[in-house]
Amino acid sequence: MHLATIARHALSRGTTPAAAYALLARRTREPLPSARAVCLALSIPLAETTRRLDDCYDALLANPRPNSETDTGELLEALGVFDVPKTLTPTERTVVAHFLTAVDAMGGIRPGHQHGLDRWLTTGNLTTAYLSLAAAHPLPRTGDPATYWTALVTAGELLTTTPNPDTRIKYALAHCRTQATRTATRTT
């Protein structure tokens, strides 16, 4: 049976991508084909699958430790290797453009926050991305607070127009508006 078929079957029975990887890797002793099979079973395009696996091949898949399949699967999942890309609507793409403007205006971003944002944008979890940016602040020396808060206000306004917006967005938007007003007051 083809590995992707086995992975698809495991996933259809509620197995997590990490556990499906561990199952295949234990069975085949071939980590790269096992990870590829899970990605393909999740309908992640082959080119994107190849890029993602190339990024982590040396660290996780080239020389696996015996009995490390479960840990490796969990790491692959945490790294976003198994994240299924969401096709965004035009409004969502505009929101993402405002997020990217805000990230540029931060003047620097922690690697962990950047990793989280990358994953949320890939999977279309724009609410979580927005809330994380609204809770952050531009860096004092290198950031552009006016651009940062303005981009987040615009993104938040767009997010509130989507069907069934999360109520937390309204509170975060109010916070961003307050910060934008404070920033404008300081610069005038």
Image (cartoon, rainbow, N blue to C red):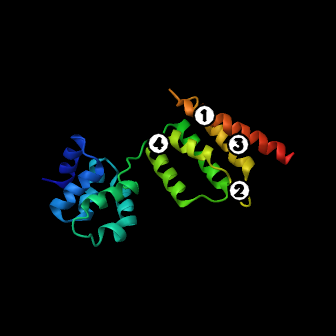
Q: Which mark is residue 158?
A: 1
Residues at marks 4 and 2, CA–CA distance in whole angstroms: 26 Å
Select label 1 or label 2 by which is in front: 2
Q: Quadrant of residue 182?
A: top right
User: Residue drawn at (28%, 47%), measured in percent from left and top?
Assistant: 16
Q: Residues within 10 Å of mark 1 (few under 14, many from 20)?
A: some
Position of residue 59 measured from the top left corner of the image (x, y, whole percent): 36, 70
Residue on which disc 3 sits: 150
Q: Earlier in the sequence, mark 4 or mark 2?
A: 4
Choose mark 4 or mark 2, whichever is in front. Answer: 2
Discs 3, 1 touching: Cβ within 8 Å: no
Alpha carbons under labels 2 and 3: distance apart: 13 Å
Looking at the image, do the residues carrying marks 4 and 3 touch, with CB atoms under 8 Å apart?
no
- Mark 4 or 3 closer to N-term? 4
Alpha carbon distance from label 1 to label 2: 23 Å
Tag 2 residue: 143
Distance CA(mark 4)–CA(mark 3): 22 Å
Which three-letter amino acid code belongs to the residue tagged 4?
Gly
Q: Which mark is residue 124?
A: 4
Labels 1 and 4: the sequence-earlier one: 4
Inspect the image, locate mark 1, and give the three-letter code of the amino acid beneath it. Answer: Leu
Q: Secondary structure at mark 1?
A: helix
Specify few, some or many for label 4: CA neighbours under 10 Å numbering under 14, 14-19, or 20 or more. many
Name the residue located 40 percent from the left edge and 57 percent from the top edge: 79
Which one is earlier in the sequence, the residue at label 3 or at label 1? Answer: 3
Q: What kind of residue is marked 3? A: Thr
The answer to whether the residue labelled 4 contacts the one labelled 2, judged by CB atoms less than 8 Å apart, is no
Q: Percent x, y for residue 44?
A: 34, 50
